[in-house]
Image: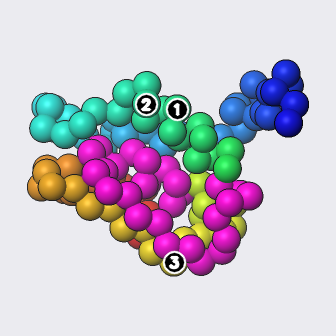
Amino acid sequence: MDISKPKYAKTDFLKYIFLDYLPVIEKNELDRVYRPNDDSYLMLDVLNLEANNSIPNGSSILEIGSGSGILINHLASFLDRENKPASYAIAVDVNFDACTLTKKYGEHYKIN
């Protein structure tokens, strides 16, 4: 394995459209859930880069601990844009507010 050459070029990241959760949330709504942070955005980059190769059409997606819902909604939206829609996108969280925000976020962008 050649580790001297990066697998992806920096320009690969520029083609992905990230959904903005800010128009969806109300004041103080993120105070009750896990806020998207550096780890969330790193995971979004990885999901976008690997989704086309690793996820077959009609797959089911499960996220445990959805927090704001940014990951599950981005992945479902990305797959839909790439004509590889998921059969199911399911997110769970022990925090009721996180479940509510995840659903609200998905509904705002018309993600089933």
Q: Which residue is mark 1?
A: 42
Q: Tell me whether circle 2 and circle 3 mark residues in contact (CB < 8 Å).
A: no
Camera sees residue 90: yes
Q: Is residue 19 left or right of residue 70?
A: right
Q: Please determine whether, in this image, residue 15 is positioned above or below residue 77.
A: above
Q: Amino acid at mark 1?
A: Leu
Give the secondary structure at mark 3.
Answer: loop
Question: Can residue 97 be found in the magenta stretch?
Answer: no
Residue drawn at x 59%, y 77% is 58
Camera sees residue 26: no
Give the x, y percent position of residue 49.
68, 44
Residue drawn at x 52%, y 54% is 75
Give the secondary structure at mark 1.
Answer: helix
* Range covered by the magenta-colored residues: 51-77
Give the x, y percent position of residue 33.
19, 40
Give the x, y percent position of residue 26.
19, 38
Q: Nearer the viewer, mark 2 or mark 3?
A: 2
Q: Which residue is mark 2?
A: 39
Question: Can residue 63 be found in the magenta stretch?
Answer: yes
Q: Tell me whether circle 1 and circle 2 mark residues in contact (CB < 8 Å).
A: yes
Say which quadrant the C terminus sits in.
bottom left
Q: Earlier in the sequence, mark 3 or mark 1?
A: 1
Q: Amino acid at mark 3?
A: Ser
Q: CA distance from mark 2 to mark 3?
A: 26 Å
Residue drawn at x 61%, y 61% is 79
Q: CA distance from mark 3 to mark 1?
A: 25 Å
Q: Furthest residue to the top?
A: 4
